[in-house]
Image (cartoon, rainbow, N blue to C red):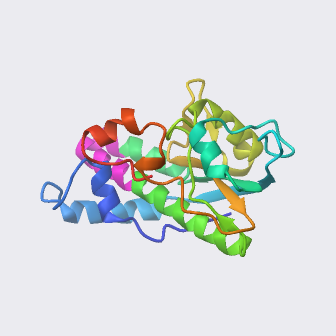
Amino acid sequence: MELRIESIPRGETLRYLGIRGHASAVDEAELTRLERVLRDTARPRGVWRLLEITADGTLAGTAFRPAGASVQALLTGCESAVLMAATLGAEVDALLRRTGRISMADAALLDALANAAIESVCDRLCAELAGELHPRVLTPRFSPGYGDFPLSQQPDFLAVLDMPRRMGVTLTPGGLMLPQKTVTALMGVSDHPLGIKGRGCEGCAMAERCLYRKEGITCGK
């Protein structure tokens, strides 16, 4: 499905730049210009699939069994799971390469904007899914690479969601998704109310080893 970039939160952009508080070190006019260029260039798309969780934790009709204690905790009490993916498109990768050849400073700003933009697109997709699946309840999304949800399961997302055909997303031998501004995630789905889980440091299996927390910030998840 085609999606829109509803907004690019400035606070998220600054977080990706490693800036806390007032953005005095950032040229606001340049950031606004690059945001406009990014919005004009991006071609956001999303895909998703609802799958029943079988007794052994495998997603029905697939060989995919999400791994990690964090994911298992997220799915506790859920009858089904949604696999989702969103991308800004290959056009944004090309824009980042062109910008980097001209100005590394602008490329850094643009990269932070793109990171914030893809998260915003994911938020939009999740909101649409919540409406479509209502009255069933969705957990927060959880992506490979967070907590102990291994990046090695990224190929399962590509296969189950048929991402190469449906979105033009592929995986390099090193495990990098192309286009780079692409996110995959899993959400639990239940027929009954669930406690809020899956977000915050307290529920993360990596909390004691997290590099973000050592610097006094969070990953935002």
Q: What residue is at 51 percent from the left and 42 percent from the top?
A: 180
Of residues 30 and 67, the one nearer the viewer is 67
Does residue 3 show up? Answer: no
Is 171 situated left or right of 60 in this image?
left
Residue 64 in the image: above or below residue 14: above
Of residues 199 and 47, the one nearer the viewer is 199
Residue 25 lies in quadrant: bottom left
Measuring from the top left, give residue 50's x and y in whole percent.
Answer: 77, 57
Is 163 situated left or right of 107 in this image?
right
Does residue 213 show up? Answer: yes
Extreme-right residue of the structure: 61
Q: What residue is at 61 percent from the left and 44 percent from the top?
A: 71
Is 152 situated left or right of 112 in this image?
right
Measuring from the top left, give residue 125's x and y in whole percent.
Answer: 60, 64
Is 74 situated left or right of 208 in this image?
right
Residue 100, magenta (yes or no): yes
Extreme-top residue of the structure: 173
Q: What residue is at 68 percent from the left and 34 percent from the top?
A: 155
Residue 124, magenta (yes or no): no
Residue range highlighted in magenta: 99-113
Of residues 193 and 133, the one nearer the viewer is 193
Residue 165 in the image: above or below residue 117: above
For the N terminus, the image quarter is bottom right
